[in-house]
Amino acid sequence: MTQAMRAFAKWATARPLRLILLSIVFVQILAPVSAALIVLDALRRGPVAAMTSALLAITGFALISLALGAGLVEALSLSAPVLLASVAIGALLGWSRSLSLTFQCLMVGAVVVSLLLFTVVPGVDQLGDFLLNETLLLLESVGLDQERLTLFGATSGNLLVQFLLTSVVLSLLAALMLGYWWYALLDPSARFGVDFRALKLGRFAGSVLIVLVALRLFVAVEMIQNMAQLAVVGFLFQGLAVMHARGHSDNWHRAIIVLVYVALFSFSPLALMVIVGLTVVGLLDNFFALRARIEPHS
């Protein structure tokens, strides 16, 4: 599989047009893959070239959406935030050569952007209800029966906002990891495995996210609830890094980690247990040396 991914990354970056076309295709079905291609482009050719690729991909996706009858605003709201943010994280990673620093900036940036949205942008608190109404209209147009429409209509608009924000952050984190892995396959000086096993929120970012999680337990404010959900995502990724670090240093059988990922994406009650467990591990890693036995960088 590694050889196949190396061949794909090499082929995709050989011609800028290939990467742009792939980004347009994947942003419609797998946004993290499209964003990962932009991160890879930023690492290979620089942020200016990656910005050009992102803008062309956004334009291409918007034109296709218009041709299919979708609204321009909806098309841009789906593609632009993820692809433009991918340019930024790719540029930061290329400049700093630090996966942890990029991870920390991404998480703090997500919290800051979320805070600004709910305090500066007028009417953003009604975004959930708007999304719910639009989704109901879409489901009704494709023939969903009235009973299921009523059931879906009982969904809280706030839950949809949380889902949207969390989906964007998850997409960007997945893009960061996948894009950097592809780059490491092409550049021997990049060590994705070592860097991912050392992934950590750090003192500042970790403190910010811990405060948000604590506030969520005592403050019933919608904005705090939404931002705390993002904090959980940060601790989840740090928990994954701890798992890989201990698996590497303690020589776990590879099947153990595979089973954890299978459970994580199983969409079952077991998945929730795995998410909670990894999130707790990621949070505790900020207080205890859970990776004390990890190998030194070499």
Image: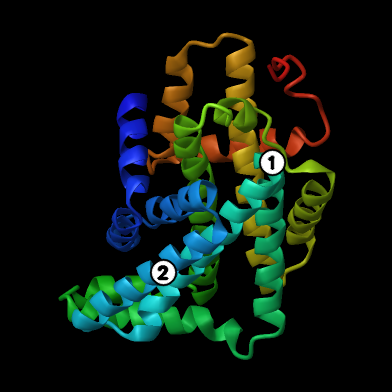
Element class at badge 1: helix
Q: CA distance from mark 1 to mark 2?
A: 25 Å
Residue 82 in view, yes or no: no
Q: Nearer the viewer, residue 284 or 83?
A: 83
Q: Are marks 1 and 2 in contact (CB under 8 Å)?
A: no
Tell me if mark 1 has few (under 14), some (14-19) or many (20+) residues whose alpha carbon lies within 10 angstroms of its own: many
Q: Which mark is residue 100?
A: 1
Q: Which mark is residue 212?
A: none
In the picture provided, is 112 more to the left or to the right than 278?
right
Across and down, in percent, residue 22 comes to: 30, 55
- Seen as rendered, the residue at the extreme left is 143
Across and down, in percent, residue 112 comes to: 72, 67
Tell me if mark 2 has few (under 14), some (14-19) or many (20+) residues whose alpha carbon lies within 10 angstroms of its own: many
Q: Which mark is residue 79?
A: 2
Inspect the image, locate mark 1, and give the three-letter code of the amino acid beneath it: Ser
Q: Residue at x 56, y 59 (%)?
A: 47
Inspect the image, locate mark 2, and give the three-letter code of the amino acid beneath it: Ser
Across and down, in percent, residue 62 comes to: 32, 77
